[in-house]
């Protein structure tokens, strides 16, 4: 089965989902990366180097819950979806104890032609805001999607 992408989804944010950043989650994530930097485990050490507390590794936003599943939103089978690139921008570090409201939006959709035929590039932008409403990070993920046909909503 091939997916059918609805262009009317472009630019629409998912509902904001609250993600609470816990010390244990940071520790487990850092351990899974094989990174034993004490800023991820030891609050006193983190404060001694000028941080407010235990900080999350830069790729930690991959662990956050979003308001929708990407494959469902694009209506594509998992074998059609290939992660190509991630770009993260931070306004400030993510700390243990943070409560972040995360949204996700499809921001780009384009058809390309490669050596094996037609494919699509899809860019998803996730944004995390703190309880004060200020942006903490933005993560842009680029995906290559094969077997996807652009579609339209039928008039109802």
Image (spheres, helix red, strand yellow):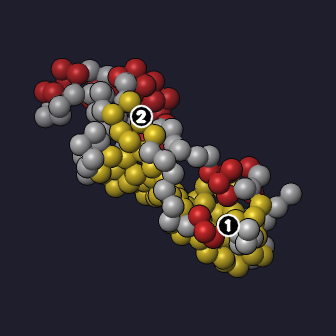
**In front: label 2 or label 1:** 1
Residue drawn at x 42%, y 34% as measured from the top left: 19
Residue 150 in sight from this viewpoint:
no
> Horizontal placement of 72 versus 40: left or right?
right
Q: Find residue 115 and report its horizontal and vertical position in percent.
A: 74, 76
Q: Position of residue 4 (x, y in %)?
A: 75, 64
Give the quadrant of residue 106: bottom right
Q: Is residue 82 left or right of residue 51?
A: right
The CA distance from mark 2 to mark 1 is: 28 Å
Q: Which disc number belongs to residue 19?
A: 2
SS class, disc 2: strand
Taking the spot 51% from the left edge, 51% from the top edge, the residue there is: 14
On the image, the x and y values in percent for residue 40 come to: 32, 28
| Residue 24 shows in the view | yes
Q: Which residue is mark 1?
A: 6
Q: Is residue 147 left or right of residue 92?
A: right
Residue at image location 26% in from the left, 20% down from the top: 42
Residue sitting at 22 percent across and 28 percent down?
Answer: 53
Which residue reaches farthest front? 156
């Amino acid at each position: 089965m091939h997916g059918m992408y609805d262009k009317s989804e472009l630019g629409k944010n998912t509902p904001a989902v609250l993600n609470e950043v816990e010390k244990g989650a940071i520790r487990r994530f850092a351990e899974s990366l094989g990174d034993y930097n004490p800023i991820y485990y030891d609050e006193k050490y983190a404060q001694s180097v000028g941080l407010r507390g235990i900080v999350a590794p830069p790729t930690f936003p991959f662990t956050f819950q979003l308001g929708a599943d990407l494959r469902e939103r694009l209506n594509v089978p998992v074998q059609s979806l290939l992660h190509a690139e991630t770009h993260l921008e931070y306004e400030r570090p993510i700390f243990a104890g943070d409560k972040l409201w995360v949204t996700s939006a499809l921001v780009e959709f384009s058809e390309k032609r490669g050596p094996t035929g037609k494919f699509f590039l899809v860019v998803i932008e996730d944004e995390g805001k703190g309880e004060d409403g200020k942006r903490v990070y933005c993560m842009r993920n680029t995906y290559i999607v094969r077997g996807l046909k652009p579609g339209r909503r039928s008039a109802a």
